[in-house]
Amino acid sequence: MIRAAITTVAGYVPDYILTNQELEKMVDTTDEWIISRTGIKERRILKEPGKATSDMASAAVLELCKKRGISPKEIDLLICATVTPDMVFPATANIICDKVGATEAWSYDVSAACSGFLYSLVTGAQFIQNGTYKKVVIVGADKMSAILDYEDRSTCVIFGDGAGAVLLEPTTEDIGIQDFILKTNGAGRQHLHMKAGGSLMPASHETVDKKLHYVYQEGQPVYKHAVYNMSEVSVEIMKRNKLSSDDIAYLVSHQANKRIIDATAERMGLGSEKVLMNIQRYGNTTAGTIPLLLMDYEKKFKKGDSLILSAFGGGFTWGAIWLKWAY
Ligand code: UT7
């Protein structure tokens, strides 16, 4: 049996650090409010003019190839999860391949907001498991600062910019992706979306004047659905694989709100030592959170460690993946 294993992780965050103190000067907020409600202390912002999601993603992919000692030409398929593509079309994945020299790969984007990395990881893994490909790159990248209203305190404090990438390769050992549960509920879109810029409401002077090209979020309903749904699938994937909390090495959760992560971990019966977080440094980088978390904690993992990856986000989309770390 061929399984798909993550064999390398890499990431990129921009240099510019936007602190809570700086945000206090921009909107009516406080460091205390942001930390107590979300756990975020600072986030990274891609400030350079002319730089986009693909630039962060390309830096992550080049680092990934360097770490694994492969040429980008060896990549068979590259999938990019993002809600902040460089352009509406073509796919940002295509632009990344061009920028890194992945000339032999085909590529496409996946739009699943904060669950985009999980959706893409499962999608890419299919090509490995069925023997079609040997090297699939999964990127999660978002330049959230491009779609945030820095006069809206309820959204601009939460998000940040960043990109992470993993390499999937085949293995016949009992490691790699073991099981997944992925869900969608399009009715949830009313609570979290961007109103204009699509075919429903193309860009116009009016849409710009009305600030309709920014993230629209009703925080509380999203919060409630996130806690309920993310913990439900995380507990379900443990149950159906007969995993106890002792069997799980770490929870690698989407970083949207420390309280959501804590609530999920509690329902899974996991102590805080098993809950990985970097939300305090990067905020919510949407599709970037999980690969950036894998990158930051890579040295902690041992071969065979069971990790539960879980996420919830716009769509609504959510899910959980059980994998055994491969190195
Ligand atoms: O990753 C994609 C999925 N997204 C999520 O998972 C986000 C889920 N939602 C959340 O994490 C939380 O709902 C937020 C962090 C967005 C908001 O926290 P909350 O505890 O749900 O606050 P709230 O929206 O209920 O607002 C409470 C109060 C309000 O004031 P009033 O009406 O009580 O006077 C807000 O206006 O906090 C106010 N508020 C702020 N105050 C200071 C909202 N944003 C801020 C702010 N600073 N930045």
Image: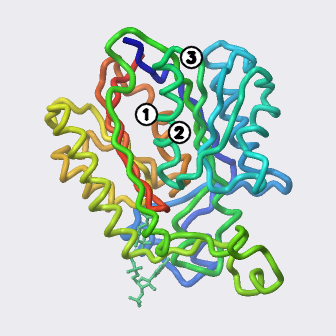
Residue at the image point whose x is 51% and y is 77% from the top: 154
The answer to whether any part of residue 21 appears in the image is no
Tag nearer the camera, 3 or 1: 3
Crowding around mark 3 (Cα neighbors within 10 Å: few <14, some 14 to 19, many 20+) is: few
Q: Nearer the viewer, residue 84 or 200?
A: 200
Q: Is residue 51 left or right of residue 181?
A: right
Q: Secondary structure at mark 1?
A: helix
Q: Is residue 298 visible?
A: yes
Report the Cα–Cα distance between label 1 and label 2.
21 Å
Q: CA distance from mark 3 to mark 1?
A: 30 Å
Which comes before the other along the chain, label 3 or label 1?
3
The answer to whether 228 is drawn above or below residue 139 in the figure is below
User: How far across and down, in percent of the image, does residue 49 sit?
Assistant: 84, 57
Q: Position of residue 206 (x, y in %)?
A: 78, 86
Q: Mark 3 touching mark 1, by CB under 8 A? A: no
The crowd level at tag 2 (other Cα within 10 Å; few <14, some 14-19, many 20+) is: many
Specify whether tag 1 is near ligand 1 (CB below 8 Å): no
Residue 120's label in the rendered image is 2
Residue 270: image quadrant is: top left
| Residue mark closest to the camera, 3 vs 2 | 3
Residue 297 is tagged as 1
Distance between the Cα atoms at labels 3 and 2?
A: 16 Å
The part of the image, by quadrant, that contains residue 221 is bottom left
Pointer 3 or 2: first along the chain: 2
Colour approach in the figure = rainbow
Q: Residue at x 62, y 19 (%)?
A: 67
Closer to the chain start, of discs 1 and 2, is: 2
Q: Which residue is mark 3?
A: 132
Q: What's the amino acid at mark 2?
A: Ser
Q: Are marks 3 and 2 in contact (CB under 8 Å)?
A: no
Amino acid residing under circle 1 = Tyr
Q: Amino acid at mark 3?
A: Thr
